[in-house]
Image (cartoon, rainbow, N blue to C red):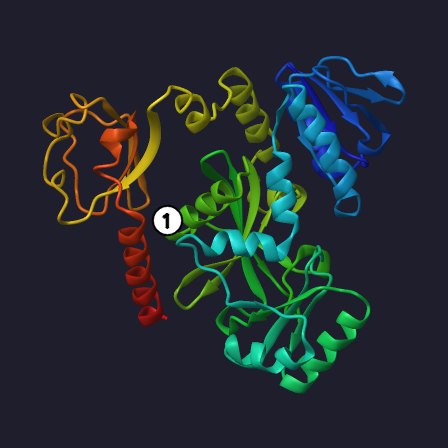
Amino acid sequence: MKIAILSRSPDAYSTRRLKEAGEQRGHTMRVLNTMKFSMLVEQGRPSLYYRNKRLSTYDAIVPRIGASVTFYGLAVVRQFEQMGVFTLSPSHAISVSRDKLRSIQVLSRHNIGIPQTVFVRDKAGVLPAIEHVGGCPVIIKLLEGTQGIGVILADHPKIAEAIIETLQSTKQNVLIQKFVKESKGRDIRAFVVGDRVVAAMRRKAVGEEFRSNVHRGGVTEAVTLDPVYERTAIHAAQIMGLHVAGVDMLEGANGPQVMEVNSSPGLEGIEGATKVDIAGAIIDFMQEQVRFPEVDLRQRLTVAKGYSVAEVTLTSSSELVGKALRNTELRERDVQVLNIKRGSVVIPNPRGDQVLLAGDELLCFGKRITLKSYVPSIEAQRAAKKKRDKKKQKKS
């Protein structure tokens, strides 16, 4: 394969390791400066120029885009996508992950532990916001901070209010986040590649510092993740749409609390701590993806008139519960079950003897008129959502 690494720092550890790993596997690797591209946007022929010369053909790219050039870098990645080139990190996923508020909003829709977070602009709303997350101490975060920069621990409401007011006066957007005291000074970084965690480390702050980032002087150690933490990391990366991600989690009293999903995680700290060839795992994953590219199943299958893709959640009263798949007559009614999600487990292409259980989520493709009989009405869905929300409130 011919692979381009989009990076302004060819000598950076992560860039060098990815280049080495690719070359060791027989691939042609080039490091291209993200800011040296120009884009030609015309009907039917999207193309790129590099240093004023038309770019040759590439099979895949690895975006290593710094936060300071996110806007232009994403435009370059989107142009590669329009040209049909596989990108390790899709442009949309990078965009979401770089916005701390947007990313935590996306995660909040799912069964993922996250610290309680408030976003407020009105000065009068600051103190009530602090109470919403349980009172001081609180963490104050800049929306676009990296490597621990722009993360402040405030012990008193008035101090927090003054800090927020000062930052907002400089046109900075800030988040107020619950301080997870049982995890003070340490967190876990899980490195996700595809559908597995290839390595994980615990980062610990030194001295009185509460930020555990390596760039802040934190120390690291390899860890074997509890299955709950491993599933959480993989799920968070998948929700964000990232093939490769560094998922940072706090060790909360009630389990993992996802702080951030990094779309361009560094390799030096975690490879040094774990001795795992993460760069090699990334290149191996890319090989498989280029050979078997992802297909937008919903878009492709719903082209057929009268057919749809739908997710059906089985309640205890469903006529399908307790039956083997072959005895449900779904196939006879022109409905194919593509997979079954059961808790954190996904059963792909289920066999006919697979017995369906209450709570199973079936991903189905078939006649829309048939699927309607299994998909609840909007009113029923709304009632079910209210019921779930009440349960969540009681738990919290």
Reading the image, the residue beneath label 1 is 227
Residue at point 48%, 44% (across, down): 239
Q: What is the number of callouts on the image?
A: 1
Is residue 260 visible to us here?
Answer: no
User: Which image quadrant: the C terminus?
Assistant: bottom left
Q: Quadrant of the N terminus?
A: top right
Using the rendered view, name the quadrant where residue 22 is placed: top right
Q: Position of residue 94 (x, y in %)?
A: 64, 41
- Label 1: how many Cα within 10 Å (few below 14, some 14–19, many 20+): few
Q: Is residue 227 left or right of residue 207?
A: left
The residue positioned 66% from the left and 58% from the top of the image is 213
Foreground of the two, 281 or 4: 4
**Residue depicted at 52% across the width and 40% down the height:** 192
Foreground pick, 24 / 110? 110
* Residue 133 drawn above or below residue 291: below
Tell me the quarter of the picture where residue 394 sits: bottom left
Q: Which residue is the extreme one toward the right? A: 52
Residue 104 point in image, percent of width and height:
54, 56
Q: Is residue 192 visible?
A: yes
Q: Is residue 55 left or right of residue 365?
A: right
The percent position of residue 348, horizontal first and vertical second, equals 30, 29
For badge 1, the amino acid type reads: Pro
Left or right of 245 on screen, residue 254: left
Q: Give the vertical position of 121 relative to 9 (above or below).
A: below
**Up/down of 156 relative to 390, above or below:** below
**Quarter of the figure with residue 388:** bottom left
Assign a secondary structure to mark 1.
helix
Picture coordinates of residue 266 (x, y %)?
66, 43
